[in-house]
């Protein structure tokens, strides 16, 4: 098929008749925002963007495309860190944006569930839960743009995994448009349901390779009535882990997030982010601890504030914590969180970086940070390790920034070597090369090495059974 006519004309006509001008974009200016990923690693082409306004419209569009053998790329907020939601350069892959399927169908504060459509932005889901007096706890830097369908399709983790689990743990049921256009309604809101294979879990983390998630039943929790945030300079990586253990041993249920940051990363925040004030500058290692409770505050020096102060005092006496700042108001707590949340943006502004979203057993996080930093420094002298992230669940973003003065493109040309260097350490520590961002397009070539043999074979057989034509998000996840 020639590039200037990548879609059969009858298919385009049928899609136009089905979807109308709001539901089918063909103007190059309208296609533009859908072609590149957040990290600008990939830029593809698409003949059109399908934006269905209902599940029935999506199902019919999928049937039409399946009949024509046209490949489809699901897209939510397009914040994928691994190029999962962008089309390839061939010009035949049709982007399907779920943006218009963004209704909240139901919130039930007694069942503690929310039934939300895939295109609903994560922040809107959080706000709606709060409006009903509940909490939807999934929280991540891209929450103002990422969607319910996207976070489920990548099985996103984020800041609160240590307490609430990842996206998979927050989902009770799904509605899916399958690759042949059938609609599977699995929107059950049951806490217990042992009826054969748990099909809903197939689509979580599948990154759009098995079908379109169109709606989900999400678990809600009691809202926090009290919270505390501490920002601590710690002696080293081991001290960060020791501090986590102190909190966990005192009151595991109180820890909502426990995030590690390097001095380098905090320095980038101060340098690049407007208003980027850091309360305790000049240290090499930092931790942000967020405590929350759904019990009403008890008043006086009890509750979470007492816990926070007691643990910090113990850790200071032990030489683990060097200095600490406590958020005294909602605004101060948000400002402390901002230091962590703006890490990806600050790093982007500093220059070229190679990102490694890896996980190891929690006990191995200090070794991961130290050994991979040292190994990368041997590979490229002057390289700047910027590890940060979810120490409390073992997921560190083991990112590496280009050496000062090195050409960004030359640095990125070494990406593969850098990732391999980090992954060697990760493998040795019994970890995973993808903790929460997924495989997308970026990491497909690692799958055979890490998940080869029976595991990959089984994945390929599931893919062939559910999507025999291979039309769902081709080139992603599976090699
Ligand atoms: P997209 O990027 O549009 O898509 C992601 C994948 O899911 C693609 O493969 C796409 O094809 C597929 N997909 C999307 N919607 C559907 C659907 N309805 N049905 C089927 N497939 C679909 N992730 C974390 O886990 N933790 C973090 O802390 C975190 N922080 C981040 C911070 C920043 C600044 C950014 C930019 C990203 C961050 N991420 C994080 C990445 C995270 O994976 C995405 O933000 C989010 O999970 C993807 O949501 P999205 O709607 O943007 O999906």
Image (cartoon, rainbow, N blue to C red):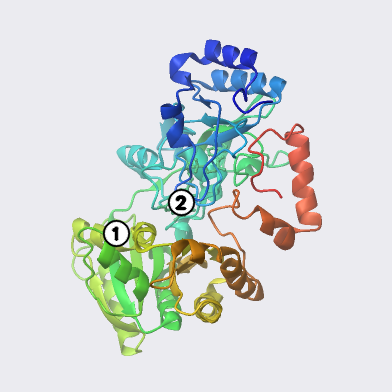
- Which of the two labelled residues, at mark 1 and mark 2, occupies the earlier sequence position? 2
The mark found on residue 123 in the picture is: none
Q: In the shown orientation, is residue 465 left or right of residue 33?
A: right
Q: In the shown orientation, is residue 85 left or right of residue 322?
A: right
Between 285 and 442, which is closer to the camera in this rendering?
Answer: 442
Quickly name the residue at label 2: 39
Q: Quadrant of the N terminus?
A: top right
Between 151 and 94, which is closer to the camera in this rendering?
Answer: 94
Between 195 and 472, which is closer to the camera in this rendering?
Answer: 472
- Location of residue 474 in the rendering, given as x and y in whole percent from the top left corner: 66, 39
- Outermost residue on the bottom side: it is 318
SS at mark 2 in the image? loop
From the image, state whether disc 1 or disc 2 is nearer to you.
2
Residue 211: name its quadrant: top right
- Location of residue 433 in the rendering, given as x and y in whole percent from the top left corner: 61, 63
157 lies above or below 308: above
- Location of residue 77 in the rendering, given as x and y in whole percent from the top left corner: 44, 39
282 lies above or below 44: below
**Residue 188 seen in this snapshot:** no
**In percent of the image, x 70 and y 48: which residue is there?**
478
Dot 2 alpha-carbon crowd within 10 angstroms: few under 14, some 14 to 19, many 20 or more: few
- Location of residue 83 in the rendering, given as x and y in whole percent from the top left corner: 54, 47
19 lies above or below 226: above
**In percent of the image, x 41 and y 45: which residue is there?**
136
Whether the residues at callouts 1 and 2 have beta carbons within 8 Å, the answer is: no
**Residue 56 seen in this snapshot:** yes
**In percent of the image, x 36 and y 61: which residue is there?**
343
Quickly name the residue at label 1: 338
SS at mark 1 in the image? helix
Between 127 and 141, which is closer to the camera in this rendering?
Answer: 141
- Asked if the residue at label 2 sits under 8 Å from ligand 1, the reply is yes
Q: CA distance from mark 1 to mark 2?
A: 20 Å
């Amino acid at each position: 098929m020639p590039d200037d006519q990548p879609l059969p004309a009858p298919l385009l006509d049928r899609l136009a008749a089905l979807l109308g001008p709001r539901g089918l974009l063909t103007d190059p200016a309208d296609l533009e925002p859908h072609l590149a990923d957040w990290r600008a690693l990939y830029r593809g082409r698409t003949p059109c963007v399908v934006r269905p306004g209902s599940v029935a419209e999506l199902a019919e569009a999928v049937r039409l495309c399946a009949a024509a053998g046209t490949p489809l790329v699901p897209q939510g907020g397009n914040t994928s860190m691994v190029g999962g939601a962008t089309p390839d350069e061939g010009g035949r892959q049709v982007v399907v944006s779920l943006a218009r399927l963004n209704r909240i169908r139901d919130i039930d504060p007694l069942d503690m569930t929310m039934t939300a459509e895939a295109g609903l932005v994560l922040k809107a889901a959080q706000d709606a839960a709060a409006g009903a007096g509940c909490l939807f706890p999934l929280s991540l830097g891209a929450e103002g743009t990422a969607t319910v369908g996207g976070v489920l399709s990548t099985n996103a983790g984020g800041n609160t995994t240590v307490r609430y689990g990842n996206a998979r743990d927050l989902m009770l049921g799904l509605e899916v448009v399958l690759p042949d256009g059938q609609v599977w309604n699995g929107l059950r809101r049951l806490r217990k349901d042992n009826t054969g294979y748990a099909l809903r879990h197939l689509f979580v983390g599948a990154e759009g390779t098995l079908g379109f998630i169109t709606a989900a039943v999400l678990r809600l929790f009691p809202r926090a009535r009290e919270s505390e945030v501490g920002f601590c300079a710690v002696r080293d990586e081991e001290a960060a882990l020791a501090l986590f253990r102190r909190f966990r041993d005192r009151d595991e249920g109180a820890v909502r997030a426990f995030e590690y940051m390097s001095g380098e990363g905090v320095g980038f925040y101060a340098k690049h982010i407007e208003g980027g004030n850091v309360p305790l500058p000049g240290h090499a290692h930092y931790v942000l601890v967020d405590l929350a409770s759904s019990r009403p505050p008890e008043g006086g020096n009890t509750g979470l504030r007492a816990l926070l102060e007691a643990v910090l005092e113990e850790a200071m006496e032990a030489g683990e914590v060097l200095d600490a700042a406590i958020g005294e108001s909602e605004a101060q707590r948000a400002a402390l969180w901002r230091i962590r949340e703006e890490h990806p943006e600050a790093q982007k502004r500093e220059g070229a970086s190679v990102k490694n979203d890896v996980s190891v057993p929690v006990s191995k996080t200090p070794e991961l940070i130290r050994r991979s930093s040292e190994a990368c420094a041997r590979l490229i002298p002057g390289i700047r390790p910027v590890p940060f992230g979810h120490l409390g669940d073992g997921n560190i973003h083991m990112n590496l920034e280009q050496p000062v003065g090195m050409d960004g493109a030359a640095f990125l040309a070494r990406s593969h070597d850098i990732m391999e260097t980090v992954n060697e350490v990760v493998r040795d520590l019994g970890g995973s090369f993808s903790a929460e961002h997924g495989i997308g397009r970026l990491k497909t070539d690692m799958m055979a090495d890490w998940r080869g043999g029976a595991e990959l074979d089984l994945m390929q057989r599931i893919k062939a059974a559910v999507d025999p034509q291979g039309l769902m998000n081709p080139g992603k996840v599976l090699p």
